[in-house]
Structures are given as C-alpha cells and as structure tokens.
Image (spheres, grey):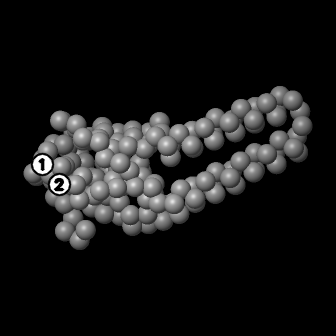
C-alpha cells in the first residue's frame, strides 16, 4: 500500500533557499576563476547537485509491503522489516535532522533494531491511516500516545 508524502511549503522553500545559497557560491567561484577547465568542473558539479536536490523533493514516497516498510526520497531509501520496528514517535522541527526521508515540519520517527541509523523520519500525508496499517502489519509496535 502506497502513502502520499506530506510536503510543507516552508520546509521545501528552506531547502531550496539553502540550495540557492550553495549555487550562488559556486557561480561566484566560477566568475572569479575563468579558466575553462575550472568553469567546466564547477558547472558539472552544480548541475549534478541541483538535479539530485530536485530529485529528492520530487521522488518522495512511502510504501507498506507485505513484510517490510519501504521509504524513498530521491536516491536515499530504506527497507525496514516490520518485526524490527520497535516504536513510532512524532517529531516537530523546521528541518528534520538525522536520517530523514521527509519534507515536513511534523511527522513520524520510526525506531527499529537493525540497520545503520536505527531510526528514520517520514511524513505521510495521512498519518492515522499509515499508523493503523502499520499496526495491522505488526501489533507489537509501540505507537506514541501523544500524537
């Protein structure tokens, strides 16, 4: 089952503002040093960076499969077995820090046993339905009562 992501305009705007500052620095560096090889390298890096940034915002999704949760944001993704999920909490901050596959100020933090990060931040548009479906997959998951 696929769940649409929540995208807060303020978070996406902040993200693009950060990207714009980064791009501006690259452009200034290009104009200061006008050697063709340098300009080509900086231009190529800039194009790759902007493409990956846009890809991260556009390709954002959450899926609950039979045995696992799949979350993707651009080229970042995670697969979490339902039996590894311990708790689900909420977060509320302007730009989610840590391993985040979310573009929203408020969302869910999934804590799990295996993996490098052991937690991931996501923001499905319909949190209630997402949590109900997740709880059907594994009734042992503890869901934060404050949500």
Numbered circle sitting on residue 136: 1
Q: Is residue 66 left or right of residue 26?
A: left
User: Disc 2 marks which residue?
Assistant: 132
Q: Residue furthest left?
A: 139
Quadrant where the N terminus is found in the figure: top left
Q: Residue furthest bottom?
A: 146
Q: Nearer the viewer, residue 62 or 142?
A: 62
Quadrant where the C terminus is found in the figure: bottom left
Do we see residue 14 in this rendering? yes
Please provide percent x and percent y for residue 23.
71, 48
Please provide percent x and percent y for residue 2.
29, 42
Q: SS at mark 1? A: helix
* Location of residue 18 (image quadrant): bottom right
Please provide percent x and percent y for residue 111.
27, 52
Q: Is residue 115 left or right of residue 135?
A: right
Q: CA distance from mark 1 to mark 2?
A: 6 Å
Q: SS at mark 2? A: helix
Please provide percent x and percent y for residue 75.
47, 36
Numbered circle sitting on residue 49: none
Please tell me which residue is depicted at 24% across the width and 52% down the height of the picture. 130
Please tell me which residue is depicted at 33% across the width and 53% down the height of the picture. 124
Please tell me which residue is depicted at 10% across the width and 52% down the height of the picture. 140
Q: Are marks 1 and 2 in contact (CB under 8 Å)?
A: yes
Do we see residue 98 in this rendering? no
Numbered-mark total: 2
């Amino acid at each position: 089952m696929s769940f649409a992501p929540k995208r807060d305009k303020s978070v996406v705007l902040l993200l693009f503002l950060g990207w714009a500052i980064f791009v501006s620095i690259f452009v200034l560096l290009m104009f200061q040093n006008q050697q063709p090889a340098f300009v080509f390298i900086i231009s190529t890096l800039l194009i790759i960076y902007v493409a990956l940034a846009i890809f991260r915002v556009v390709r954002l999704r959450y899926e609950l499969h039979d045995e696992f949760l799949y979350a993707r944001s651009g080229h970042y993704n995670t697969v979490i077995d339902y039996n590894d999920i311990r708790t689900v909490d909420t977060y509320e901050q302007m730009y989610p820090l840590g391993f985040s596959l979310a573009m929203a100020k408020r969302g869910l933090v999934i804590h799990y046993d295996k993996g490098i990060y052991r937690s991931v931040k996501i923001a499905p548009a319909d949190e209630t339905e997402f949590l109900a479906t997740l709880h059907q997959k594994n009734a042992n998951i503890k869901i934060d009562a404050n949500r």
